[in-house]
Image: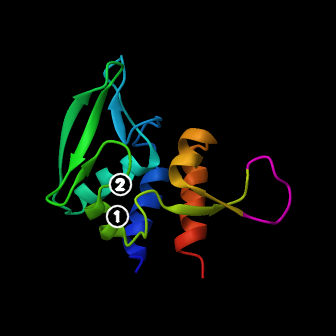
Amino acid sequence: MINKERVQFLIDALRSDEFRQGEGALEYIDHDGVAKNCCLGVACRIAQRHGLEMGSDYTNDGLHQKVYFESDSDGSAEVLPIDVQYWYGFGENDPMLKHQHQEMFEEESEWSTATELNDGEHYPFDKIAEAFELTFLTE
């Protein structure tokens, strides 16, 4: 079951200017030493901030230092660890989100994973926040 309060924490964080957007990993440190997150990396950081016990460590993939989020159950550098997934109440480690395609002018919505919107469609965080809101908070 979706925890709407926690999803709202994520939406608020995505709409803030606190996190720099990146692609290809939950979080990584770029060549300038700046942390960049995909939308699911923001979800991990927000869960930690609100009390989910989960460690984070760095791995090097040859290009970046990726952050590996780890709990007692599992860990990941690319999709939500299971404890984060359960903390929000998501049914998948890469939630399907309802959204209006950036190029479409019709009223119809479509569905894509959070990672597809962040990495494939290059949606900015505020548009991804709208998709989380439409999917999980709109009655």
* Nearest the eye: 89 or 12: 89
Question: Helix, strand, or loop for circle 2?
Answer: loop
* Nearest the eye: 132 or 17: 132
Question: On the image, numbered disc 2 is attached to which residue?
Answer: 80
Image location (x, y in percent) of residue 14: 47, 51
The outermost residue toward the right is 106
User: Is disc 2 in contact with disc 1, using a CB cutoff of under 8 Å?
Assistant: yes
At horizontal 31% and vertical 21% (from top left) the residue drawn is 33
Q: Is the residue 42 above or below the residue 33 in the image?
A: below
Image location (x, y in percent) of residue 8: 44, 67
Q: Is residue 122 visible?
A: no
Left/right of residue 71 with respect to residue 8 in the rendered view: left
Q: Is the residue 83 above or below the residue 121 in the image?
A: below
- Range of residues picked out in magenta: 102-109
Is residue 63 highlighted in magenta? no
Q: For residue 51, which quarter of the picture?
A: bottom left
Image location (x, y in percent) of residue 53: 15, 59
Q: Residues within 10 Å of mark 2 (few under 14, many from 20)?
A: many
At horizontal 42% and vertical 53% (from top left) the residue drawn is 13
Question: Helix, strand, or loop for circle 1?
Answer: helix
At horizontal 24% and vertical 50% (from top left) the residue drawn is 75
Q: Which mark is residue 85?
A: 1
Q: Earlier in the sequence, mark 2 or mark 1?
A: 2
Image location (x, y in percent) of residue 114: 52, 53
